[in-house]
Amino acid sequence: MATKAPDIARPGEQTDSQGPTIRIVATETDMTEAERVATPAPTSVALDFADDQVVFELDGLSCFYGGFRAVNEISLEVPKNKITAFIGPSGCGKSTLLRSFNRMNDLIEGAHVTGHVRYHGVDLYADGVDAVEVRRRIGMVFQKPNPFPKSIYDNVAFGPRVAGFRGNMDELVEQSLRRAAIWDEVKDKLKAPGTALSGGQQQRLCIARAIAVEPDVILMDEPCSSLDPIATLKIEELMRELKENFTIVIVTHNMQQAARASDYTAFLTMGEDRGGYLVEMAPTQELFTRPANRLTEDYITGRFG
Amino acid sequence: MAVSTPRAQALISAAVVRRSLEGGRTDWRSIGFESLLVALLILTLGILAWLLTVVFVNGVPVLAERGTDFLTSPLAARPEEAGVGQAIAGSLWLMAFVVLLSFPLGIGAAVYLEEYARDSWFTRLINTVVRNLAGVPSIVYGLLGLAVFVVALGDVLGPGSASGRSLFAGGLTMAILVLPIVIITSGEALRAVPGSIREAAFGVGATRWEVVRSHVLPYAAPGIFTGTILSMARAFGETAPLILVGAVIGGFNVEYDNVIGTLQGRYTALPTTVYDWARKPPAFSGNVYAAIVVLIVVLLLVNALAIYLRNRFDRRW
């Protein structure tokens, strides 16, 4: 509890222009306990960051797989050089939401979105936006470590190569592996296949591969779900180092991980139609200590999910 | 009888456990089933061994006696002069058609269907048609080749004395015959590449072409090699369509010294030669067996090459 909690702006109150403010759109807090339990509707509690701090701005984003709406009308902002975590029960659309940030869902047959994902103000789904370029700037680390069945070196070098990197590749590979905190473990076997590493090492190799193309954002889709606790802690430590240079958005079903590693947390859950919606987003400490919504409270205290 | 103490009870239950563990009931059904499986295996291998023995016992002496003469001599009316030289050449030419036409076309079609085409009623229709074509009897392809390559295009593909029954006609027919098999096996190899690998490559900003060229195709290569080479072996062993599209039975003279002339000229193949000789007087029977030995050895070599290539390029993920 040592970090300073951002100010919470009540309606009508002046706020410090540096820190983020919490804009409470629905006046849920005025409800009685009974009313809160009875109304599991979205509360639309959104954080409002200074414009130059916003990397992603979601505006009424819905994601569909064919006729099924997996993500329902989500609006939120993702701040720069912070770790933003999405938590929520399985199947609530967290991963789908994350994959809409770099148009990864484009690769899935029948997937489409409505609403807007603005990245530094540019609508990623507007006509003429090149999905390949989007993914070059917004990298991704996946749930299951998926190194290429090639050498460790080639795993890292592939991205820069296709991006037309002209500099010293050896240096870039070393630097990327160092930043992913795996250099010391692999420096003597760069020609060995990436698939021969342990699970935790593979995932750090995948992080090295992601940062080798110098992205702006790294999306992490449950990056530790197949790792043991020690490897998980290593990745979390690494994330904290990486946020100096990158904006990180992580999906996790591990609440402790969100609480430990993230600056902001958004809680999603699913509605009657199994479509996921945003319940609330807040500074992580705030969300875990004083959740604004009963659903969040139930989830983080383990009564649901 | 009442059991006296807890200790006595424990001893009794221990005895019960021991009896059931060590009782050793014989599981007759398992033994029976296993014996049946072994018997079937022996039967299968026995038939194969018998076939091979008959072929080799009758064929090898002829090969040993004639030596390279048998492998290089042309077809002839007299068994002691007749050889499989033209047949080997023809079969190799047919394989060349398959390699040069079916492989690029088939692998290309598979890559398109698996990696590029959207899932629509049209692609589903194409997939269904390809699957059905793979099951069409080869004689039907022979009829197609006869109608198209021999009759309709005969003046171009096999002018003059060949009267349409040219190496072109045979090769193109074979290429079409194995095309569906190449598409299906290549498609399966491509589908076996995990989607996570594609996502990883797309995730660092690769284009679809870069994903296919640098990852999907290399990783699918062992499977594609296996499938395509086995389809080549299939083409090597086909007889029926070749008889329809004019593989020579009997004998002919090779009078061409350039490639186009050869392709437009008459030809024969190993399996058709075996078929032809088998219908001839018994004096030819040694030749038949020897030709079969040659056919089997070449097929084994092709299959061995397939296995070698698969292992050579095999990858793990």
Image (cartoon, coloured by chain):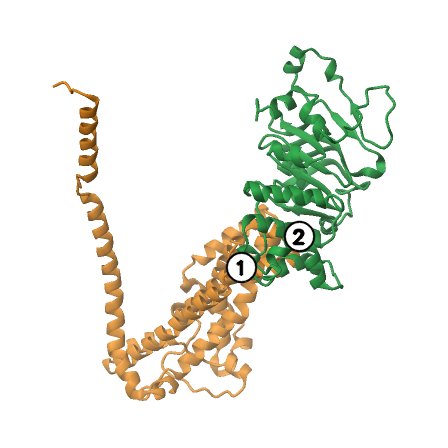
Chain colours: A green, B orange
Per the image, label 2 sits on a secondary structure element best described as helix
Hey, what amino acid is under mark 1?
A: Ala
Q: Residues within 10 Å of mark 1 (few under 14, many from 20)?
A: many
Query: Which circle marks residue B75 in the picture?
Result: none
State the quadrant of the N terminus of chain B.
Answer: top left
Judge left or right: residue A2 versus residue B97. right
- At horizontal 69% and vertical 37% (from top left) the residue drawn is A113
Write down the residue under mark 2.
Answer: A208
Above or below: residue B306 compared with residue B197: below
Per the image, label 1 sits on a secondary structure element best described as helix
Judge left or right: residue A40 versus residue A243. left
Q: Which one is nearer the viewer's eye here, A68 or B141?
A: A68
- At horizontal 48% and vertical 67% (from top left) the residue drawn is B309
Q: CA distance from mark 2 to mark 1?
A: 25 Å
- At horizontal 57% and vertical 48% (from top left) the residue drawn is A200
Of all chains, the one bearing label 2 is: A
